[in-house]
Amino acid sequence: MQKLVLTLWVFLIFNSAFAQEVAEGVVKDAETGALLVGATVVANQTGDGTLTDAEGSFKIEVESIPAELKISYVGYQTQIYNWKGESNFEVNLAPQQMEEVIIKGIRGTERTPVTQKTVSKKEIEEIYIGQDALFLAERLTPSIVAYSESGTNYTNYGQMRLRGIDQTRINITLDGVPLNDMIDQGVFFSNFTDFGNSVESFQVQRGVGTSTNGTASYAGSINYESIELNRPEPSVELQLNSGSFNTWRGSAEVHTGRMDNDFAFYSRISMIHSDGYKYHSGTDSYSFFFSGAHFGEKDVFKLTGFKGQSQNELAYLPVAESIIQDDPRTNPLSPNDVDDFGQWMLKLEHTHIFNNQLSIASTAYYGGAGGSFPFGYDTQDILYTGDTNDPADTVSRFTQINYPLQNDHFGILSNISWNSRDESLTLNGGVHAYTFHRNNQEQIVPDYNNPYYDESSRKDEISAFVKTSYQAGGFNFYGDLQMRSVKMTIEPDEAYLGFPSDDIVWDWFFLNPRVGVNYQLNTENSVYASFGRSGREPTKVDIFGGFQLTADNYPFVTDQNSVQPEFVNDLEIGYRLQKSNLRILANFFYMGFDNEIAPIGETVVEGFVQLRKNVPESYRTGLEIDWDWNAMSWLSFRGNLTYMDSEIATYAPDDEQTVYENVTPVLSPEWIGNGTLAFRVTRDLTIDVTGRLVSESFLEPTNDPSFVMPGFFVLDSRISYQMGKHSFSLALNNLTDELYYTYGVPVGNEPGYLVQPPFNIFGTLIVRF
């Protein structure tokens, strides 16, 4: 009898924990009545979420009646709906005017025939512990591999590759404003840490994708949307985070919500410290993010800015494998090599809505970056005797070179959007112009006032695009044409060169077309195909073959034919399934490259130069799948998987007589995958288990089997507990304490790697008011 009572008691507790009501409804555009596919619906009581299907419908379990439902969709105002048990109710979302043109002007929609994934605020929050933005993209979207120089996968410098292609070939923007350094074309998220905390959503387009602003969308593009301001209620949020490698983070943010005077403000301040996993690879950083807007009847003015500053102990050199086996925390750089670098942006947006069919949005912005970047080394001075000039002794001396730089980036952009009354035809046009100024110096520490190298560079660009889509029955036809006119000017340091020189100027012009079609098979299934071509100009490092303009590389640099622009022809074919409990995106891609830029030219030892050349032909092709399956109310499975085949047709390095054929590009693994099982243990307790797989890849382009980066499989877990508005989570990473690497180069006669973190743990407390 006691066993029966106990069993019944346990059953009742378990059953009550999961006894829930089901809310069913549909989400529409408040102005046009159009169904909103892929809108996010969250039950505020439980934190559970779902997406609307191809008919704009959703089903979601709630704890009890009444229940608050939070409905959001990119480009629309978030709405809190108080559900009181009615069946098949309708939620109408009002357009988010300030983002309708700027964000939608460069993003793809569910029916745009491009390969893309949009990540919502809710998805970011589920895994966010303060890590830099590239580690978020790696976890949440397909085909990305990131690495951490400090070995934390949290902060300090890191990079990512998309489909095996490096970060300088990825276009990255915030609300359409470029974040890339225009001259080197990279982005360093460690300059403005905790950036992901102020992001409402981001979209990753793989392949050429839609036209955007800034550097070429060659491998793909990532567009971040800043935090939403037009929300109904004010809030305050505090985040405290602590964990392995003596890491801690404090963050405080305030939302006013939309006030009675139609103003809304948001601000966040954050501080991060970490010792790093590798020896002397720590970080001290702070960041500030601000946004404010005024919402008029037809006009929205929005001011957004951020500032970040970091002091990173540098750890960028890969370590030989034999040394890693002795001590994986080895860092060959000096403990005195600590940079002090920052990045900032200020932008003013204005959006005007003429009517339901026509709107225009314009932005003026200033971005900057600057600081010091030191490199130290030991030298041996020989002492001579006074009488015979014979060597008497040697003295070790530490020498440090500082590489300061300053960037100033000014730009304007404007997007106009028009649609027919029935929305079957849409037209979008955009223009963007900027000027980017850079000053590079080199100094012997501590003689900062007398640099021995002082060079200035400038890049100017004007670009424009026009996009159109036409809906005819189940077909959606898409066309997109972008024009880019780019000019880069180098003002040499004549004293360092040793002879006079005029400014060196390069001019490039690109026409980048995209066409595609999407076909809606039925309410849940669609297919698409697209083709795009994009050209990319070389970076300054590509042209110099290094970081200095010297007498050794001067003939190469001044020869306008030395390094030509590179081009990609991208074919994408995909399938989409959208159900209330299952979403699948699967696609095939073929990227054919003409004149791909690679470091295969002559090596000039005296000038530390590795000249670049163009590889005539290469390709990358493969299959990608991304899924999200809510199998049961207490179990979900989401993830992505990529298979990729990459090949360079002919590779002929100048320093060798050998011609290599049909070789695999470096750091291009065949398999990349993520999978997460989420278990809803109780109403408030969730446990996630995530596996990440990356197969082996080559470290150098001749495919020497001695220089291979091993594949790996890493297992992580996350435990989340909701306490009303507040929450606590515990992230346990690399549960099996795997020794693994995601980046490497040859170091002498053996492979060298950047070691990624062993088992580590982070706890995060979020308090909301």
Image: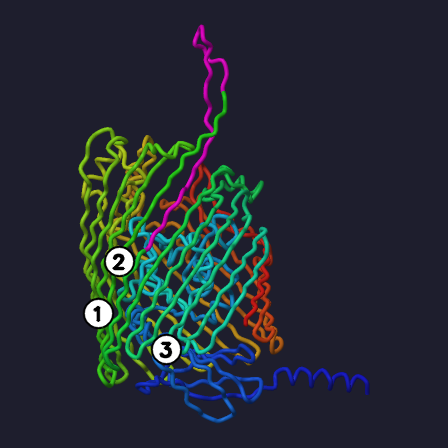
Measured as percent of width and height from the top left, residue 467 is found at 22, 71
Amino acid type of the residue that numbered disc 1 sits on in the rendered structure: Gly
- Quarter of the figure with residue 589: bottom left
Measured as percent of width and height from the top left, residue 346 is found at 34, 59
Answer whether residue 12 is magenta in the image.
no
- Quarter occupied by the C terminus: bottom right
Q: What label does residue 14 carry, if any?
A: none
Name the colour scheme. rainbow
Q: What label does residue 429 carry, if any?
A: 1
Question: Which residue is identified by label 3?
Answer: 76
Observer-nearest of 690 and 390 = 390
Q: CA distance from mark 3 to mark 2?
A: 27 Å
Answer whether residue 368 is magenta in the image.
yes
Label 3 SS: loop
- Which secondary structure dominates the residues rendered in magenta? strand
Labels 1, 3: front one: 3
Label 1 SS: strand
- What range is drawn magenta here? 367-394
Q: What label does residue 411 carry, if any?
A: 2
Q: Earlier in the sequence, mark 3 or mark 2?
A: 3
Q: CA distance from mark 2 to mark 1?
A: 17 Å
Amino acid type of the residue that numbered disc 2 sits on in the rendered structure: Gly
